[in-house]
Amino acid sequence: MTIEKTFSIIKPNAVKKNAIGDIIHHFEQNGLHIAALKLTTISKEKCELFYAEHKERPFFGELVSFMTSGPVVLLCLSGENAVLKNRELMGATDPKKAAPGSIRAKHGDSMGENAVHGSDSLASATRELAIFFDKHEFVNV
């Protein structure tokens, strides 16, 4: 059994639609635990750091504008194979292609406003968690 920590964001469009509780319930009902949680807004600077790998892509400015447009929920999820489990629960990036019952199929509006972000690897999770959380903010679950 491999217990991992991964990072997730409930994006502004899902927060605006009052989907926070449903999304967290979906994580918890499928074996992930909340190790840290913040309802906050992301500064432009922190958002640009977070999405630095996309800086040269044409959608970068739109992505930063969207992610800084309103409150988000930052989550550290913990559980067995948490990175892969979170990716499965989120569904495909395009909500129209996401599996029925997945978070993005249920709450996503478009490719860009797809309700949630999730780390794609343990290395990404470690980097992303360090951007938004201090070590003392985690609980052991």
Image: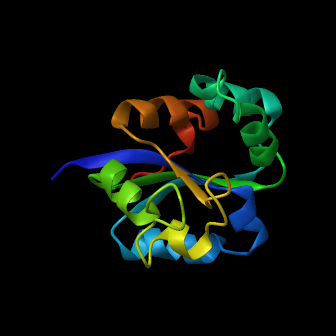
Residue 49: give x, y in percent of width and height. Answer: 67, 25
Instruction: State the colouring used for the structure image.
Output: rainbow
| 38 relative position to 66: left or right | left
Residue 106 coordinates in the image, percent (x, y): 55, 76
Q: Residue at x 65, y 61 (%)?
A: 110
Foreground pick, 1 / 42 = 42
- Front-most of residues 29 and 50: 50
**Residue occupying the far top of the picture:** 56
Residue 47 locus on image (x, y percent): 72, 34
Instruction: Write the residue at 33% across / 58% down.
Output: 85
**Residue 22 seen:** yes
**Residue 61: x, y in percent?**
78, 33
In this view of the protein, can residue 141 be seen by the observer?
A: no
* Horizontal side of residue 112 vs 85, given as left or right: right
Identify which residue is drawn at 35% across, 48% down: 83
- Tell me: 54 left or right of 92: right
Residue 75 drawn above or below residue 52: below
User: In the rendered view of the protein, which quadrant contains the C terminus?
Assistant: bottom left
